[in-house]
């Protein structure tokens, strides 16, 4: 648990249009989108490493843990997490979720223990004559690289979620071949439902569950193609009707007994 039992929450967040877009994307109310974000910030503040979602120093938050935290079903939580990633509000690196602008919004000076420690270190440096002058930060203009950076963050987060899903189902996903496969799926536009469908298909059409993520390339791409196909009657899918990928994902729950 953090030594600081509070964090800065800015009133401007109430009018942030990001929550409107997240609410529309996830099919939830703005109040739900806002409340879930507040819960995530609370968890990040309480984390052993502030700004990142850790239960303990050795145990990170999984998608299931985030779902339990914010009170969403797993699929709804997955969609919410990806919406936060697209809005550049959270990221995922090496399987660890983190709040993107935590250090910008939360000041280390708020923590008196940390402030006293730095003050003492500074005084010690002065006494020893080892004072370092930090040059002023130079801010560059926004360029097209901002879009590329945002896209890269989305892909990194999706890749980590794919890896976590594989690992959760006992599928190895850390060899170069496995990572290459998952990265290709992410860049190709696959979503978690496609991957889940690929896992189910592998179980139904082979002697056993896939042992490596590299074996899921074809099945996942097939599921993605089916998901992107327009309805045969030329009309939009009725609300509440499951897509082929979603049906396969439901089968996955039955196969593995997970929700």
Image: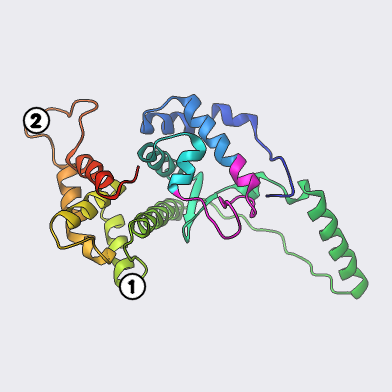
Estimate the x, y position of residue 198 in percent, counting from the top left: 21, 53
Q: Specify whether residue 219 is painted magenta.
A: no
Determine which quarter of the picture holds residue 119: bottom right
Give the residue displayed 34% in from the left and 65% down from the top: 173
Please give left or right for residue 24 compared with residue 105 in the image. left
Toward the viewer: 93 or 204? 204
- Relative to 109, residue 122 above or below: below
Toward the viewer: 15 or 226? 226
Determine which quarter of the picture holds residue 186: bottom left
Give the residue displayed 35% in from the left and 40% down from the top: 75
- Relative to 239, residue 116 above or below: below
Seen as rendered, the residue at the extreme right is 127
In the rendered image, is residue 71 in sight?
yes
Please give left or right for residue 103 compared with residue 203 in the image. right
Estimate the x, y position of residue 80 in percent, counting from the top left: 42, 38
Label 1 crowd (10 A; few <14 / some 14-19 / many >=20): few
- Relative to 122, residue 43 above or below: above
Toward the viewer: 186 or 201? 201
Give the residue displayed 50% in from the left and 36% down from the top: 70
Look at the image and give the residue range highlighted in magenta.
42-62
- Relative to 130, residue 258 above or below: above
Q: Quickly name the residue at label 1.
A: 176
Question: Earlier along the polypeptide chain: callout 2 or callout 1?
Answer: 1
Front position among marks 2 and 1: 1
Q: Specify whether residue 58 is painted magenta.
A: yes
Q: Which mark is residue 193?
A: none
Q: What element carries label 1?
A: helix
Distance from disc 2 to disc 1, alpha carbons, whole Å, reads: 42 Å
Q: Quickly name the residue at label 2.
A: 234
Total numbered labels placed on residues in the image = 2
In the rendered image, is residue 189 in sight?
no
């Amino acid at each position: 648990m953090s030594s600081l039992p509070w964090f800065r929450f800015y009133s401007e967040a109430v009018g942030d249009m990001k929550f409107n877009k997240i609410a529309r994307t996830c099919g939830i109310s703005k109040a739900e989108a806002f409340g879930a974000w507040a819960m995530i910030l609370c968890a990040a503040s309480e984390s052993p490493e502030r700004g990142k979602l850790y239960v303990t120093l050795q145990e990170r938050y999984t998608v299931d843990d985030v779902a339990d935290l914010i009170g969403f079903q797993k699929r709804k939580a997955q969609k919410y997490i990806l919406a936060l990633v697209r809005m550049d509000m959270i990221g995922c690196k090496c399987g660890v979720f983190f709040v993107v602008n935590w250090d910008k919004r939360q000041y280390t000076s708020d923590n008196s223990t940390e402030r006293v420690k730095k003050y003492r270190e500074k005084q010690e440096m002065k006494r020893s004559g080892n004072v370092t002058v930090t040059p002023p930060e130079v801010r560059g203009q926004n360029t097209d690289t901002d879009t590329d950076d945002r896209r890269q963050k989305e892909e990194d987060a999706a890749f980590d979620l794919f890896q976590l899903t594989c690992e959760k189902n006992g599928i190895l996903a850390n060899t170069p071949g496995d990572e290459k496969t998952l990265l290709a799926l992410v860049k190709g536009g696959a979503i978690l439902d496609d991957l889940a469908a690929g896992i189910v298909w592998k179980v139904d059409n082979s002697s056993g569950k896939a042992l490596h993520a590299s074996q899921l390339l074809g099945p996942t791409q097939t599921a993605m193609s089916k998901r992107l196909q327009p309805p045969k009657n030329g009309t939009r899918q009725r609300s509440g009707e499951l897509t082929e990928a979603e049906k396969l994902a439901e089968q996955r729950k039955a196969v593995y007994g997970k929700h």
